[in-house]
Amino acid sequence: MTAQPPAPPAVVRHGAAYHLSVWGVLLPLGAAAGGLLSLLPGRLLALPDWVLALPFLPGADKLELLAGVSGPILTAVLTVIGVVAGCFLALMSYDEVITVEVDGEAVRVTASGETAEVPRERFGTAFLDGRELVVLDAGTAEAVRARTDHKAKRLRAAFEAHGYAWSEGDPHADAFQRWLDGTPDLDARTQALLRTRQEALERKDADDAAELRAALADRGLVVRDREHRQYWRALPGREV
């Protein structure tokens, strides 16, 4: 019998319509905002004197100076600045753009130009934790955690097409407990990492929080966040 060729990879990515909508909306909006901003000084001069005297406005004399330089050149400059700002916002939106490729050999998740690969023999299960795709390895450690706006239905179809398990939520959710500073269940080093990570969450430093999550994973701890509160579970057979 002739061997069946391997099934093609299942790929979940954003199509051309997504990219067109991002660039086709944010750039014109930036240009329009810049053009409207060039008209603002003249409009403000029409306000009553008591409004112009408010402390957060630059004052009538400065507004008259700004209105005096208004014209095609200022409009063009501010429009270009608006377009640049639109480009910046468009690029920021790609922080949540990930590509998921699933085949018979492995699962690959690409985000921000970096690819994480989980071979089939190491794969445990995958699920959505809020707006994050999580892939657990066979030892229940997090092999991948990536923010995404892909729908669960589409992701599940890609995984199951090649025989990978998909869970409707974290199958180990009951094992998590809320972190309390000073709990005797964790050693001093782990406590210090969680304490530092809590500070990163409070100041909304996502990069630092992700780096500290990886450091905790090296110590056998899985961490998830709920409204700036940390919850943790220990990996099987690991002392924390």
Image (cartoon, helix red, strand yellow):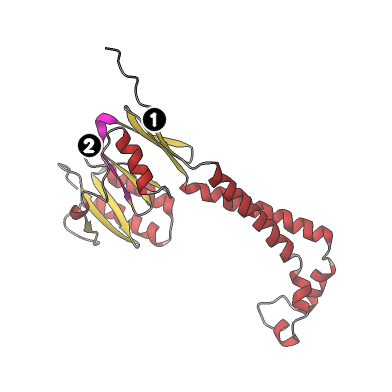
Residue at image location 17% in from the left, 45% down from the top: 239
Which image quarter holds the N terminus?
top left
Which residue occupies 78% across, 60% down?
Answer: 75
- Label 2: how many residues lie within 10 Å, few (<14), some (14-19) or many (20+)? some
Q: Can you name the residue that lies furthest to the front here?
A: 1
Q: Which residue is mark 2?
A: 138
Mark toward the start of the polypeptide (1 vs 2): 1
**Residue 79 is a magenta residue:** no
The relative height of residue 191 versus residue 97 in the rendered view (above or below) is below
Task: Residue at 51% x, 47% y: name it.
Answer: 94
* Residue 24 position in % (x across, y down): 63, 50
**In this rendering, is residue 119 above or below 165?**
above
Q: Which residue is mark 1?
A: 9
* Span shown in magenta: 120-128
Q: Nearer the viewer, residue 86 or 197?
A: 86
Please state which amino acid type lies under the numbered disc 1. Pro
Q: Is residue 144 visible?
A: no
Single out the mark in the foreground, 1 or 2. Answer: 1
In the picture provided, is 58 more to the left or to the right than 73?
left
Horizontal side, residue 1 vs residue 49: left or right:
left
Q: Is residue 56 above or below residue 206?
A: below
Does residue 162 appear in this view? yes
The question of residue 126 being in magenta is answered with: yes
Report the residue at 39% width, 27% height from top. Answer: 8
**Magenta stretch, main secondary structure class:** strand
In the image, residue 92 above or below residue 98: below
Q: Is residue 209 left or right of residue 20?
A: left
Image quarter for residue 68? bottom right
